[in-house]
Every structure is written in structure tokens, then in C-alpha cells.
């Protein structure tokens, strides 16, 4: 089974917040975990923003960056190419998604994911309507049952 994880899922695993325990359970379930290359940059930017806004300390930031590298080594990473770009554009139009949300959904399609995991409710709704089982750590329903 392949589970696609977006950036919001990675952040749940890196910073102790609502949904962290559920995200860890989702992470531990599949045979393959996948994400798109840009998720790394999105995660680093989100962590830096959390530090600037003083939601996390510098020590937590450093630990989270190290944790990101550990998580990244466990992921099958989808590259952005012309096929993904065009599919993302179509999905953005069809589902009214923001650019990188459409990229995540397109990457999940191209990698053949069974489950789409995100803490973004709107993106989860789009993934569900696109035929994915959805795992949202904030609204933890078990897609593996």
C-alpha cells in the first residue's frame, strides 16, 4: 500500500501539536510513503515561519530540521515533470486548488497512492472526490480499515 503525505503531515510529525499522535500512526501503517520534491522546501519554510512567530523555540526548530531529514530518507520522492505539471493544472481547475495543493494531489495520482494524507481539510475533500482514501490526522478516521 502506498500512502502519499503532504507537507502538513510532515509538520505534524516534526512539531508536537494537535494531530501529532495520529500522524505518527498514519506514518507507521503503509508499505510505501511518498511525497513530492517541493514538500521539503514547504516544510523548511513552515518550520522557519513557526520559529519567527515564536511558536517554536530555536532548539525545537533545529530538532525539527534534523527530523525532517530523517523522515525524508524514508520517503519515495516524486519529481516535478511536465506530466505532473499539466495534471496539477487540471486538478487546480477541477477542484479549485491552490498551486502546491494541486501539485501534491497530482503527485499522489502519478505515484499510484492508495491513501492521501493531509491535515488540510479542503485538500482532503478534493483527494476524496478524486478517489483516494483520505487520512487526516486532525479528523482521524482510519483509512486502513
Image (tube, rainbow, N blue to C red):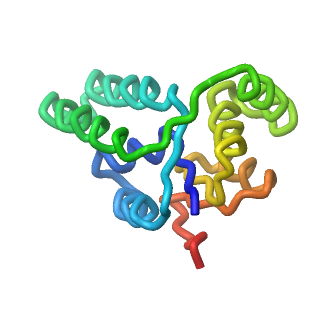
Decide which of 1, 103 is in the foreground and name it: 1
Residue 93 location (% of width, % of height): 85, 30
Q: Where is residue 99, by image quadrant?
A: top right
The answer to whether residue 5 is above or below residue 32 is above
Residue 81 location (% of width, % of height): 67, 22
Decide which of 2, 145 is in the foreground and name it: 2
> What is the number of callouts on the image?
0
The answer to whether residue 104 is above or below residue 31 is above
Residue 135 location (% of width, % of height): 57, 61
Residue at image location 25% in from the left, 32% down from the top: 65
Decide which of 117, 60 is in the foreground and name it: 117
Q: Residue furthest left?
A: 59
Q: Quadrant of the N terminus?
A: bottom right
Residue at image location 55% in from the left, 73% down from the top: 142
Q: Where is residue 144, by image quadrant?
A: bottom right
Residue at image location 65% in from the left, 38% down from the top: 107
The answer to whether residue 2 is above or below residue 50 is below
Q: Where is residue 91, by image quadrant?
A: top right
Instruction: Specify whether 5 is left or right of 48.
Output: right
Decide which of 139, 14 is in the foreground and name it: 14
Residue at image location 57% in from the left, 71% down from the top: 141
Residue 46 location (% of width, % of height): 40, 29
Q: Quadrant of the C terminus?
A: bottom right
Amino acid at each position: 500500500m502506498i500512502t502519499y503525505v503532504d507537507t502538513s503531515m510532515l509538520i505534524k510529525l516534526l512539531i508536537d501539536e494537535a494531530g501529532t499522535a495520529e500522524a505518527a500512526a498514519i506514518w507507521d501503517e503503509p508499505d510505501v510513503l511518498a511525497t513530492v520534491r517541493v514538500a521539503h522546501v514547504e516544510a523548511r519554510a513552515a518550520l522557519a515561519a513557526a520559529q519567527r512567530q515564536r511558536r517554536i523555540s530555536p532548539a525545537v526548530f533545529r530538532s525539527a530540521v534534523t527530523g525532517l531529514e530523517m523522515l525524508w530518507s524514508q520517503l519515495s520522492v516524486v519529481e516535478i515533470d511536465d506530466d505532473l505539471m499539466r495534471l496539477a493544472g487540471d486538478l487546480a481547475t477541477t477542484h479549485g486548488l491552490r498551486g502546491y495543493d494541486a501539485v501534491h494531489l497530482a503527485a499522489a495520482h502519478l505515484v499510484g497512492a492508495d491513501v492521501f494524507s493531509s491535515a488540510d481539510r479542503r485538500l482532503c475533500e478534493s483527494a476524496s472526490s478524486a478517489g483516494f482514501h483520505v487520512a487526516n490526522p486532525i479528523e482521524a478516521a482510519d483509512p486502513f480499515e
